[in-house]
Image (cartoon, rainbow, N blue to C red):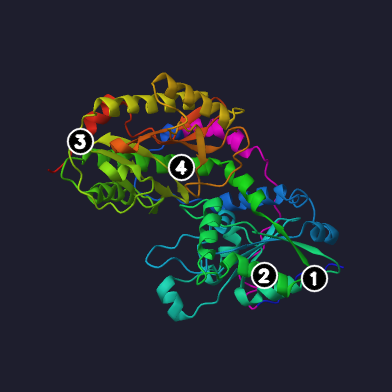
Amino acid sequence: MFLPVQDTSPQQDRGAKTGRRGAASPSLAKRCLPLLLATLGATSLHAQRLVAPAEEFVERRARLCAQLGGGSAAAAEEPTPARIEQLGTALLFATSEPDAGVRLRQDHDFFYLTGNEDKNAILALEVASCRAWLFLPPQTAREASRDGWNWLYQEDAAERWGFEQIHPLHYFDEFLARRRVPGPQKLWVRLSERDLIDQSRTDAALFFARRLSNPWAGQPSEDAWRIARLRERYPHYELRDVTPAIDELRMQKTRFEVEALRRAGEISARAIARSIAATAPGVWEYEIEAEATHEMIQSGAEWPAYPAIVGSGPNGIVWHYNRSDRQMQAGDLVVMDYGASVAYQTMDITRTWPVSGRFTELQERAYRAVLEAQKAILAAMRPGVTREATRQVAREVYERHGFDADKHFPGGAGHFVGMAVHDVGDYHRPLEAGMVIAVEPIIEIPEEDLHIRIEDTVLVTEDGTLNLSAGVPKEIDELLALVGRDAKR
């Protein structure tokens, strides 16, 4: 029989219980989009940082419970022990330590469901009832003087953020033990790779595989180690992968997420426009990067979404070049790929422009082909359209301008954008309202040091798309008029 958890933790009086919550409608993003789009223009850009309300994370947990088959009974009545046993418990783990020298960015999946940025935390989510518990490490006064007190020491944190209770971390194993029943039980855990701000789950898997090829770097990942420990300590639990259910939710943006993406798009567009205006022969690539980074942070972004790509001349054909150490010369093209992160939502924008403010004949012809292709892709994108259909539209434009679509990169509806620049999502599905996607056709001629890329991040709506990064010029006359406007040399 099911053994209910008793509140025997030393922290049992911290935080009141919050009641039961029903599951959210899976069409939440679609229902909210018309209201959101009607109000997008009403919010002015300012430097105050955008923070998601606690209700956003409670709603996300409810949607995950519904995705896993639970939650719906919780609003009306207490779920039965059999139902709790049948649906199991989801576990998500926080970041243990940030990378050296950078501000901590919480594990995406953990943050998506909690809003918590404390290190070494664990979320336990009972699927049947959607009740949630948080486990945090106790702190000494010295630790708190360095990092601040975590939610374990904030009296109203459990109630405010919708948790049944916040326990000290050492109670976690006892918590699982108290949920023991005869027979197998489900634990929903992340069996797939974690994504990072500048790496998709696939990227992370590839980089890990490359590390394993080094005989002196073959240690398991932190996630793999956790899974091994769970299997070792709790062989009666049946581990299931929660990643597909989380990815399904993250692929459809909520109203708040779209607002954060819109803000990130405005900030990023201003940042790149500032860099274009500061461009001139003799300026260093790092000076252009600095202009954009200054604008992002000053405007309220928490982080750049990825290391700035500012490639001039021969560096422009290195797709992920990020050293920014070349002095730009007359006749060079600059390829700048850079974006901001706001409220854990990122932005991906690329613009290409001539350092001297004038294209050559070949550069301009390639630019016009890429720009027309991007416009054609955006015009074709709407719910129900496949990625292959948008690629075909771009191929036709390239061929019409005399460029070989098989040799160059016409693209189409590209990668998902969200908490990661290459965000989670199912690339085999047709487009749906609420998806956010980067569109970046490219023409590259290496022997000419020519790489033309125009990239925008767009929201798919019921009627088409909304360009979230439209604030930076890409029409030739507007772009060239901006080049060098504020240059100091």
Residue 485 location (% of width, % of height): 18, 35
Q: Nearer the viewer, mark 1 or mark 2?
A: 2
Gap in Å between the C-alphas at discs 4 and 3? 35 Å
User: Depth check: 21 or 326 in front?
Assistant: 326
Please tell me which of labels 4 and 1 falls first in the chain: 1
Q: What stretch is highlighted in magenta?
A: 10-39
Gap in Å between the C-alphas at discs 2 and 3? 56 Å
Q: Tell me the number on the disc at residue 228.
A: 2
**Quarter holding the C terminus?**
top left
Element assignment for label 4: helix
Give the residue number, with chain letter if any, for mark 3: 331
Please tell me which of labels 4 and 2 falls first in the chain: 2
- Seen at 42% across and 19% down, the residue is 400
Gap in Å between the C-alphas at discs 4 and 1? 42 Å
Give the residue number, with chain letter if any, for mark 4: 261
Give the residue number, with chain letter if any, for mark 1: 180
Instruction: Report if the CB atoms under discs 4 and 2 are less than 8 Å apart.
Output: no
